[in-house]
Structure formats: structure tokens, C-alpha cells
Amino acid sequence: MQSKNKTAVRSMDILNLFLTHSKLSFNEIVHFSGIPKTSVYRMVMSLEEMGLLAKDRDGKYLLGLLFLQFGHLVAERFDIRQVALPIMQKLHDKVGEAVNLIVQDGKEAICIEKQDTKQRVRLNTAIGRRTPLYAGACSRVILAFLPQYEREQYLEQIELKSIASGTITDKERLRILLEDSRKMQFTISHSELENYISAVAAPIFNYKGYIIAGISVAGLEVNYQNELLPPLVEKVKSAALDISREFGYNDKHLCLG
């Protein structure tokens, strides 16, 4: 098993060379990778067989057409950034808080777009940051609207680990919060991923009523209390609905899950 894993890692090392080189000869692959020639030969043959590498008329290797197919799938998924960004900017102008766009990636959520807060505070958010689906408003709102069997499967398999002082580590309490989120169409978190930071998040749906992302505003906990919350909630829900409508969702749809 270890040798198979090693082969997979080395194969990825070879493919990664093409991030900075459009074409490479066999000897160049050997030189840049530092992998023995016989191993490179076996891996290159396998990669070519699978369509991950191709050979041009001059005998040089380049990425195969399979990557084009993968690229289309990824592009479709990340088109949401272009659609959401103008609406995120409007929300940011209204609230002055950090605005984040999150999508699911397996058992995690990943931030794919953000607008930084106008306040004098640095939040631990960055494009590419990953968080568990159970922690934080934006991650949890995605979990809340997954199909029930996916949600339950996730809850059965995951271990709820404490990340900050407010992280939810009790599964029954989490189930109640997920149900509340589904009823209210938003969720709130306090100190779940970072102490003294709160967030309000709402779901983004596609034309079929499936959850495709979450949008949130986040900032200092003191700004997310009592009478300050309702206006924030309405603005976030409105932004989420505007983005959802861009994907063909309308108020008559029932969110699925």
C-alpha cells in the first residue's frame, strides 16, 4: 500500500511540473522531477494511458485532454464567484463587515471569495481557507440544507472537535441548530471558529432548489447581539436570495434536502 501511495505522490510531482512548463521532453521530466529514469518511464506511460498526459508530434509531453474535461467541471462550480461578487460588494457596502462566500468540498467547507471588513480588526479568513461543515455559520448553513441522508451520514461519521470557545461539540445540540437553520433560512455563530468573532449566514440555492453555497457576514461578537442582529440577518438573507435567483431559483421553489 505504501509503495502505491508513493507512486501516486510521484505521479503528482510529474503532473505538477506542467503548472510551470507547457511541454516537456522525457529527459526534462527526469531532470526536473529528480525521479529515477525507469520510474519516470513507468509513470509517464501510465499517465498517458489514462489520458492525463499526451505526446505531441515532436515527442514532447503535455497535459492530456482529460484535464480539459475536469477544468470545465471546476469552472462551472466556480462561476458562482463571478455571479456572487457584485452582490457581495453591495452587501459589504451596506454592513461594513467581512463578507464570505463558501462552498462544500467533501466533509469541509472552503472559502472561494471574500470582502474584507472595514472595521479595525483582522479576521482569520482567507480565500482557500477550509473549515469543518459543523463549525461556523457559513459552513453550518451548507450542512443544514444538504439532503437529509447526506446530513445524517456526515453527523454519524464526524467527530466534533473544539476549535474555539463556542464550537458546538454536542451532536444533539447541533441537530437542533441545523433544524432551526432550515426553518429560519439562516444561521448565526458566536466564537465557533475564532474567539470573539460572530457571523450570520444564509443559503444559496440553484434552480432545482439544491444548496450550492453559503454567504455570510462576520465581525466582532459585540456587533452581533440583540437589536443589532435582525437588520444583519435580513441583509444577508436578501443577498443570498439575489444570488440564488441568478441561478434560476425563485420563491416558489422548495429547498431540497
Image (cartoon, rainbow, N blue to C red):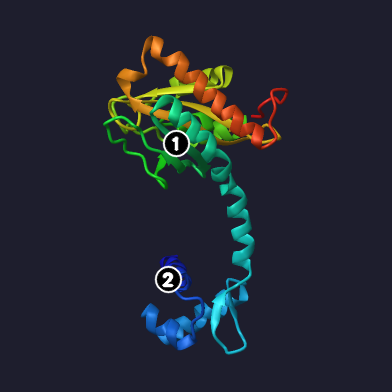
- Relative image position of residue 162 (x, y in whole percent): 32, 31
Of tags 2 and 1, the one toward the viewer is 1
Q: What crowding class fits label 2: few (fewer than 14 Cα within 10 Å), some (14-19), or many (20 or more)?
A: some
Vertical position of residue 50 compared to residue 38: above or below: above
Residue type pointed to by label 2: Asp
Q: Is residue 98 left or right of residue 24?
A: left
Name the residue carrying label 1: 100
Name the residue carrying label 2: 13
Residue toward you, 41 or 13: 13
Residue type pointed to by label 1: Asn
Q: Is residue 196 left or right of residue 129?
A: left
Query: From mark 2 to mark 1, how far is it between C-alphas?
Result: 32 Å
Residue 104 visible to the viewer: yes
Classify residue 199 by image quadrant: top left
| Helix, strand or loop status at disc 2 | helix
- Relative image position of residue 160 (x, y in whole percent): 39, 32
- Relative image position of residue 184 (x, y in whole percent): 55, 17
Residue toward you, 56 or 117: 117
Classify residue 198 by image quadrant: top left
Quadrant of the frame with the C terminus:
top right
In the rendered structure, which disc, 2 or 1, sits on the residue that comes first in sequence? 2
